[in-house]
Image (cartoon, grey):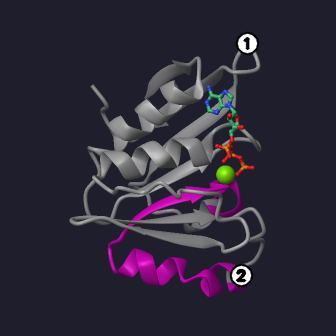
């Protein structure tokens, strides 16, 4: 497990970028932590690190899943905030993307914990000491 302390949105995006550059086919990045912690911001960085020129990484809350396409990689960004049953989860296509070994970033993974692959990367957000600060713990990958 690695612990990071983000002092700005920029720090969070940079950390996401670093992780993105290490991701390969089939990896699932599972985010945990309350609203407004920077999960979507982190995903901006993740897309950048995957070489995806994506200026429109936005919260998928209403769409449930957004697809970002780069030249070499694709990223599927899920928001499970409203998912509470297996039927809900099936209807998002989550399992189809898993089977296709796509790269997934999943907000509100708390809601689908039993459906996460064992080898997923967990990114856990919690508030820092000040308004613009966050604790970010990353489990399941070596970022050094
Ligand atoms: N250090 C920081 N890292 C990330 N975001 C920060 C930080 N400090 C302040 N913020 C602010 O917190 C908010 C994070 O929003 P973001 O949409 O990324 O959160 P989220 O975790 O995806 O929330 P939700 O669960 O509602 O989808 C933004 O308004 C951003 O400006
Ligand atoms: Mg979000």
User: Which stretch did the figure color magenta?
Assistant: 87-112
Q: Which mark is residue 129?
A: 1
Q: Secondary structure at mark 2?
A: helix
**In which quarter of the view is residue 139 placed?**
top left
Measured as percent of width and height from the top left, residue 44 is found at 48, 47
Name the chief secondary structure element in magenta.
helix
> Residue tagged by mark 2?
88
- Placement of the C terminus among the 4 image quadrants: top left
Q: Are marks 2 and 1 in contact (CB under 8 Å)?
A: no
- Tell which residue pokes out farthest to the top in this image: 129
- Tell which residue pokes out farthest to the left in this image: 72
Q: Residue at the spot x=30%, y=52% of the render? A: 50
Q: Residue at the spot x=53%, y=56% of the render? A: 57
On whether residue 91 falls in the magenta region, the answer is yes
In the image, residue 111 above or below residue 3? below
- Placement of the N terminus among the 4 image quadrants: top left
Measured as percent of width and height from the top left, residue 39 is found at 60, 45
């Amino acid at each position: 497990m690695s612990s990071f302390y983000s002092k700005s949105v920029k720090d969070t995006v940079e950390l996401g970028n670093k992780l993105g550059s290490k991701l390969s086919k089939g990896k699932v990045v599972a985010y945990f932590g309350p609203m407004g912690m920077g999960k979507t911001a982190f995903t901006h960085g993740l897309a950048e690190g995957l070489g995806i020129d994506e200026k429109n990484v936005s919260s998928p809350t209403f769409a449930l899943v957004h697809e970002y396409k780069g030249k070499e990689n694709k990223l599927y960004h899920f928001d499970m905030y409203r998912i509470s049953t297996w039927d809900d989860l099936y209807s998002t296509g989550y399992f189809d993307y898993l089977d296709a070994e796509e790269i997934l970033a999943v907000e509100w993974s708390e809601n689908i914990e039993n459906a996460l692959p064992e080898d997923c990367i967990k990114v856990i957000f919690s508030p820092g000491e000040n308004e613009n600060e966050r604790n970010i713990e990353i489990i399941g990958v070596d970022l050094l």
